[in-house]
Image (tube, coloured by chain):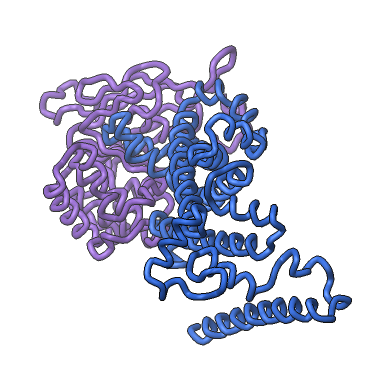
Amino acid sequence: MKNQAAKIAFWRIIQIVFVLVLWQWGATWRDNDGVWLIPSLIDPYFISKPSDIFTRFLQLGCLTDFNGDWLLSKPGGVAACLAQHPNNLWVATGATLLNTFWGFTVGTVTGVVAGLALGRSEILAKIYSPFIIAFNAIPRIAMVPVIILMFGLGDVSKVMTAWVTVFFVVFFNTFEGARSVDRDHIAVSRLFGATRWQIMRTTILPSTMSWVFASLTPALSFSLIGVIVAEFIGTERGLGKLIVEGQARADAADMMVSVFVLMIVGVALSLGIGRVQRYLLRWQAHYQDIG
Amino acid sequence: MNFQTAPHSPNTAALPRERIAVRDVRKTYGSGASPVVAIENISFTVREGEFVALLGPSGCGKSTVLNMVAGLIAITEGAIEIDGQPVRKDHCAKSVGYVFQRDTTYPWRTVAQNVGYGLEIAGVKPGERKELVDEALAVAGLYAFRDHFPLTLSGGMRQRVSLMRTLVTKPQILLMDEPFGALDTHTKLEMHRFLLELWDRERQTVLFVTHDLGEALTLADRVLLMSARPSHLKEDFAIPFARPRDAVTLRETKEYGEAFSHMWHSLGEEFRRDDRPEGAAR
């Protein structure tokens, strides 16, 4: 078993190295005389090359200046660079992450509340279902320009966009969960003399939560998508802004830096939420097997 | 041995008091011109400390009767009283404990949290609760599994958890809906032994629904035999076996064999009636 894990890790590293070397080597070769061999879709003009992306990463992150000299060794060098570039990589990543977090939190909480209310009340579900279906039919992204007009270029419009994308994911899961609470579990509560609130707290909520937790991973991805798209349309800072600015300057390395940072952020977030999920759902046999 | 219908003696003063009284209860489903009659008419009483089994073919409405006693479903006609208080839907009497056939442990709670559930609802303080739960877990042989989640346990263990969850609240009246119906024969016998042991200590008033004649004879003081649908009470047997009983060795006695064969025929008639096409029985 341990042997197999090492084997898997080994082949993964080989894959990464192979792709990076091929990318770097192909791009360099194309710059010289191999143009006819390299298809133009993977032209470094579009996708840059690993060494350039790494150089740009250091520059955007205020780790080196534009001559490639390390700023960390100069006293006050990093601070000056950060002050000079208001949307440096750190600020951009921080802004995008923070907005993603708030969009996710607000979207999840409101989705759970609405899902529980409609899932446990037949009359509310009947009244609101056509509106829910109608709102859900709107591609959320189509509302981004409106949201930015309403809430401006600041963080609020990003959180709002993330909220409308996250809300429905969590809402539908909670709704289904609240409707599928085991009737006998509710009967058990009632037989022990539980009040309505106690039934809600000890039976309906925990039972529904397993459905809610299952929706957290997609909710987080949707939140990140919402924030990035809102940043494309109009923002003061954020990774989305770095990407559209890179595109405007036809600077492939700039865009690729942001894309890679987003990839790393995305992986870290989903690993984190996966751990939380596994802990919260540890009572399910499915998660116990993974242990 | 002479199996007589339990005497409805006019001299009730000497008998223990009635705890459950079911009077002329009728249950129909659906409304309009042709409602489905589940229970035609049923009346019986269960006295203090009595272990009564409600036996009948599946689908005869025994669980329906039990659920009406528990206040889980509405009564169409007639009345049910617990300690003289009329039972209404969604108003469960405080003195009543109920055990389901299905596994109704909360999967997100550990074994100890499951057993402590009823105490938690009743507002018992955590310290006292832990003591009572630990004691119950020790009795049920579940102490080592106190921090396990139900999905890691066997069916028999989960049913013990359900049983202890109810018993730990010390209900005076115990309603059981085929609690061992989903278990294999061996586990079932273990559970009979376990239940008899517990019951001999507390002597709760029990109404126990089952379709298993052996189970009814092993556990009960009285067996009420229900007919096939639309159901009524067909017979009321007193089970005279001495207590304490042993769930395994009891089955080897001559008395058990006689009682079994006597009731087997009576029950068999109802199973056959139940096999007839819909409408033919009416």
Q: In which image quadrant can residue B47 be found?
A: top left
Task: Please indicate, yes or no, whether residue A1 appears anywhere in the rendered image.
Answer: yes
Q: Residue at x 48, y 56 (%)?
A: A84
Residue A18 coordinates in the image, percent (x, y): 67, 81
Q: In this orientation, which residue lies closer to the viewer: B128 or A161?
A: A161
Q: In this orientation, which residue lies closer to the viewer: A118 or A152?
A: A152
Q: Is residue A120 above or below residue A253?
A: above
From this viewpoint, which residue is outermost toward the top? B33
From this viewpoint, which residue is outermost toward the bottom? A3
Q: Chain A is drawn in which colour?
A: blue
Q: In this view, does B61 lie above or below A231?
A: above
Q: In this view, does A69 lie above or below B37?
A: below
Q: In this view, does B103 lie above or below B3?
A: below
Q: In this orientation, which residue lies closer to the viewer: B87 or B8?
A: B87
Q: Which residue is drawn at 63% across and 78% down?
A: A16
Q: Chain B is drawn in which colour?
A: purple
Q: In this orientation, which residue lies closer to the viewer: B198 or B24?
A: B198
Q: Residue at x 48, y 69 (%)?
A: A63
In screen coordinates, is A260 left or right of A80? right
Task: Please indicate, yes or no, whether residue A173 appears anywhere in the rendered image.
Answer: no
In screen coordinates, is A176 left or right of B215? right
In screen coordinates, is A167 left or right of A35? left
Q: Quadrant of the C terminus of chain A?
A: bottom left
Number of numbered discs on residues: 0
Residue B220 coordinates in the image, percent (x, y): 28, 44
Residue A118 coordinates in the image, percent (x, y): 49, 29
Residue A201 coordinates in the image, percent (x, y): 33, 38
Q: In which image quadrant can residue B84 be found?
A: top left
